[in-house]
């Protein structure tokens, strides 16, 4: 992970993504349609956790100055996106031992693989899914909406770095048909006129 010119912008690396809506916007029951992902950040990755907290603090300081006119909440009581999976999702093994945060945006993020190839191109949609490992560019920013003040997490871009377990109940085709898959070298005839003499 690295800080950019904007101290509230960071790149989290090699993290698992959940609830991935990076290719098409998702509209919740009470929210507008946005592109979004949930970033799972292991608590043992203390260096990345520290840098995320520093970026949140930078966004808070900018908010006090530019957004809230010095009347915003203190950092200790400020609503922010970094949440404790063990406390908020104690029954979900995916969140065990992790912090998590939702990053979202109204504009579509760029999604590439480790070779810089565009994963948003038609035919490659299935390569982007909940459970994959990725580097994610995010920017924290202050908000003030209907009297509520806090820090949110903006989604910039995603780089898929590795496959992971499909989350959300989805199973890969290879797993579904594991007992039926043959070695390509064992493939026989694809059929023909003689095959119908039964």
Image (cartoon, grey):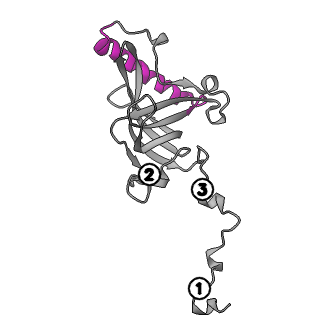
Q: Quadrant of residue 99 in the image?
A: top right
Q: Main secondary structure of the magenta part?
A: helix
At 32% from the left and 11% from the top, the residue drawn is 68
Q: Is 63 part of what is drawn in magenta?
A: yes
Q: CA distance from mark 1 to mark 3?
A: 28 Å
At 61% from the left and 46% from the top, the residue drawn is 169
Among numbered discs 1 and 3, the one appearing first in the sequence: 3
Q: CA distance from mark 3 to mark 2?
A: 19 Å
Up-down relation of residue 136 to residue 62 (above or below)? below
Q: Position of residue 184 (x, y in %)?
A: 61, 75
Residue range corresponding to the magenta coloring: 41-70
**Is residue 92 shown left or right of residue 122?**
right
Residue topped by disc 2: 113
Closest to the observer, 188 or 133? 188
Residue topped by disc 1: 191
Q: Secondary structure at mark 2?
A: loop
């Amino acid at each position: 992970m690295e800080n950019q010119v904007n101290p509230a912008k960071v790149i989290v690396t090699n993290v698992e993504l959940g609830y991935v809506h990076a290719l098409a916007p998702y509209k919740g029951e009470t929210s507008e349609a946005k592109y979004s992902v949930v970033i799972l950040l292991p608590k043992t990755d203390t260096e990345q956790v520290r840098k995320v907290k520093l970026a949140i603090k930078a966004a808070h300081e900018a908010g006090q100055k530019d957004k809230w006119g010095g009347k915003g909440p203190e950092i200790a009581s400020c609503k922010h996106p970094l949440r404790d999976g063990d406390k908020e999702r104690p029954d979900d093994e995916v969140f065990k031992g992790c912090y998590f945060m939702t990053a979202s945006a109204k504009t579509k993020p760029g999604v590439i693989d480790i070779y810089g190839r565009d994963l948003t191109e038609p035919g490659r949609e299935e390569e982007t899914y909940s459970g994959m490992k990725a580097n994610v560019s995010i920017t924290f920013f202050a908000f003030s909406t209907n009297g509520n003040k806090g820090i949110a997490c903006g989604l910039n871009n995603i780089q898929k770095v590795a496959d992971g377990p499909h989350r959300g109940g989805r199973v890969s085709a290879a797993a579904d048909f594991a007992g039926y898959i043959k070695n390509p070298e064992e493939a026989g005839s694809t059929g023909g006129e003689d095959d119908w003499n039964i």
